[in-house]
């Protein structure tokens, strides 16, 4: 079971796949995080700009503006963003795009390679400010 | 002596006797005349007679010599004329021949006959040369001939057409400038040529799935056959024949891209399935009976297996597109290896297998990409578990050897037939015994090899059928590549893994 963490950490999850969003939110809440889930790019960007969150989980393929656009806008408009941004995706981006994303984001995760538990561990590490110990297998 | 020449000999012999007799007779007659009729003293008569005899001998001797040399002269002229060596020569006249004339005339006809045969055979050779050159020219397969300097000495029309170059862009050019090959294994054409050059007089080889990059940016896929022959008198050192398989192999590649597309589509539902399985285990774990718990574990194991298969398929697709990126950093190898093994251990235990570690604690840190090396370890351990049907220990060892860190994974399973062992690292290859009984994509070991070679490592296998297999792989010691890694802003070396090995080190990108 994931370790409990202080509840004052707020997580924004922008993900259009309901099942995944629900699974992540459930696991993260259980671990003690305050989780907000959103679906579309515009509403995700609006929420993120409030600068209230500690972690933003951002899917790339979302309705409206894409995750990549959200990321670019955030970095441009909110230079003092306190949230760490973790990209969650099941796509394989072209090298150039991926390099661009990795420059702007704090992590890049292939969803299929992590279970919710493993995601919680990674989030814990990111919150604690240590390099996430990625685990690639069960 | 030939009986035919007896007549000639007798004739010459007779002439010599006559000459002797004539000289002797003339000397006696002269002495008689000089001393009896002319009253010259005997001594003077004798001297005068000898002088006349010598004079006569010289005249008659010349005739004898002519008679002896005529047949030789006749044959010599015939031979020279027959071979067309001296066209100014007068034709020999058989009328001057006396004894053995018929035989000598026959002989001269034979000489003409032989010369005719020789002339026609030279003509034939020239025709045959043209004949085979025509065949090579119209052969509907690309054919290249390399000389000892490894320049293209000959290329047929199909070859020029295949590489899309004009004759003068091919002939006398180094072969690797024209034929930009890439091979699936490290047995490249050049390596084979070097080996043949060092160790062989004649050698044959075949390659499959060779990639040929053309100057216009397109590429072809082909099979190739080659023959090497040292010291060929016409400097035909190597002959290459290409068999175009572009459409067939591209179909395979399309299949792979289709599979990879399908695999992407499977990622989302798989993520969800794994999530809910985990959720069930979390929330129902203590409410389930043993059987239900086992069901749950089976479901978790199956989704994990599916995940691994997807990772393999997608990684291979990336390797084919030269798009698998590695981030190589310093790692404590025993720690990384143990943690990877610990994660797969429950699966091994579920199959009744146990891991035994024999790790050398003094090995130095390695330079490795964590994520892809997990794939290597997973694949090798998966195989060890899959191909061991008895409950046996799978031993995992690490040690330092020749400046590299080597890891071995040994099972006591079914082993690998020696006839197929050289193919097990090939793409889509599946050992014939196991095809029906054990599942797999035929990509795992191919992937391991590509991943390891991209980070400066190497994979090998030793196996005895029925006794088990040992898979070993090496990784570079961190200190040996630290300079390179540090020069990359401490971010590690980012390197692409690809399945192709270029033929020539001077290949120009």
Image: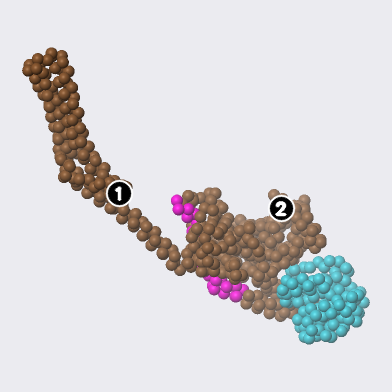
**In brown, which chain?**
B
Residue in the picture at 16% in, 24% down: B53
Above or below for B115 versus A33: above
**Could you say which is closer to the camera, residue B503 or residue B313?**
B503
Q: Are marks 2 and 1 on the same chain?
A: yes
The tag earlier along the polypeptide, 2 or 1, is 1
Determine if residue A66 is in view: yes
Q: Chain of mark 1?
A: B
Chain to which mark 2 belongs:
B
- Residue sitting nearer the eye, B284 or B208: B208
Q: Residues within 10 Å of mark 2 (few under 14, many from 20)?
A: many
Magenta-drawn stretch contains B40: no
User: Which residue range is magenta in the image?
Assistant: B233-256
Residue at the image position 84 percent from the left and 85 percent from the top: A43
Q: Residue B404's mark?
A: 2
- The chain whose colour is cyan is A
Residue on which the image places disc 1: B87
Vertical placement of residue B59 versus B426, above or below: above
């Amino acid at each position: 079971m994931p370790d409990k963490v202080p509840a004052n950490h707020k997580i924004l999850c922008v993900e259009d796949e309901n099942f995944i969003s629900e699974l992540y939110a459930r696991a993260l809440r259980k671990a003690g995080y305050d989780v907000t889930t959103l679906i579309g790019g515009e509403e995700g960007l609006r929420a993120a700009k409030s600068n209230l969150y500690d972690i933003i989980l951002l899917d790339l393929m979302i309705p409206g503006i894409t995750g990549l656009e959200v990321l670019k806008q955030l970095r441009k408009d909110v230079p003092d963003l306190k949230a760490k941004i973790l990209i969650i995706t099941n796509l394989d981006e072209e090298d150039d795009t991926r390099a661009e994303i990795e420059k702007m984001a704090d992590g890049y995760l292939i969803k299929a390679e992590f279970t919710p538990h493993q995601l919680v561990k990674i989030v814990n590490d990111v919150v604690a400010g240590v390099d996430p110990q990625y685990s690639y297998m069960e | 002596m030939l009986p035919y020449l007896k007549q000639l000999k007798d004739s010459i012999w007779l002439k010599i006797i006559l000459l002797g007799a004539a000289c002797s007779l003339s000397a006696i007659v002269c002495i008689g005349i000089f001393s009896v009729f002319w009253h010259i003293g005997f001594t003077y008569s004798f001297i005068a007679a000898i002088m006349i005899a010598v004079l006569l001998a010289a005249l008659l001797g010349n005739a004898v010599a002519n008679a002896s040399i005529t047949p030789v002269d006749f044959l010599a002229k015939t031979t020279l004329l027959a071979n067309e060596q001296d066209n100014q020569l007068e034709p020999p006249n058989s009328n001057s021949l006396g004894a053995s004339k018929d035989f000598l005339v026959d002989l001269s006809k034979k000489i003409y006959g032989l010369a005719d045969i020789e002339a026609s055979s030279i003509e034939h050779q020239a025709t045959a040369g043209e004949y085979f050159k025509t065949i090579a020219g119209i052969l509907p397969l690309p054919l290249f001939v390399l000389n000892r300097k490894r320049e293209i000495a000959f290329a047929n029309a199909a070859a020029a057409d295949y590489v899309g170059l004009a004759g003068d862009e091919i002939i006398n050019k180094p072969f690797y400038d024209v034929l930009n090959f890439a091979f699936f294994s490290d047995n490249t054409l050049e390596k084979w040529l070097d080996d043949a050059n060092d160790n062989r007089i004649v050698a044959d080889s075949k390659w499959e799935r060779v990639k040929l990059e053309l100057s216009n940016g397109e590429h072809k896929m082909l099979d190739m056959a080659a023959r090497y022959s040292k010291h060929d008198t016409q400097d035909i050192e190597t002959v290459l024949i290409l068999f175009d398989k572009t459409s067939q192999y591209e179909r395979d590649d399309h299949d792979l891209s289709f599979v990879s597309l399908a695999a992407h589509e499977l990622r989302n539902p798989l993520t969800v399935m794994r999530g809910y399985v985990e959720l069930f285990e979390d929330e129902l774990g203590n409410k389930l009976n043993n059987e239900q718990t086992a069901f749950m574990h089976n479901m978790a194991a199956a989704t994990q297996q599916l995940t691994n298969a997807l990772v393999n398929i997608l990684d291979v697709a990336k390797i084919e597109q030269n798009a698998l990126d590695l981030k190589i950093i310093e790692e404590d190898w025993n720690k990384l290896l143990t943690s990877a093994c610990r994660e797969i251990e429950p699966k091994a235990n579920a199959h009744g297998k146990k891991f035994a570690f024999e790790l050398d604690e003094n090995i130095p840190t390695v330079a490795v990409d964590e994520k892809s090396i997990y794939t290597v370890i997973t694949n090798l351990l998966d195989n060890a578990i899959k191909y061991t049907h008895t409950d046996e220990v799978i031993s995992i060892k690490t040690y330092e050897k020749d400046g590299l860190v080597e890891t071995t994974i040994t099972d006591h399973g079914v082993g690998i037939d020696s006839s197929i062992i050289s193919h097990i690292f090939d793409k889509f290859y599946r050992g014939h015994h196991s095809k029906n009984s054990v599942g797999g994509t035929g990509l795992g070991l191919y992937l391991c090899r590509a991943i390891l070679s991209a980070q400066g490592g190497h994979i090998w296998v030793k196996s005895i059928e029925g006794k088990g297999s040992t898979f070993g792989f090496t990784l570079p010691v961190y200190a040996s590549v630290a300079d390179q890694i540090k020069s990359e802003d401490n971010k590690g070396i980012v390197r692409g893994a690809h399945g192709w090995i270029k033929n020539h080190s001077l290949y120009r990108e």
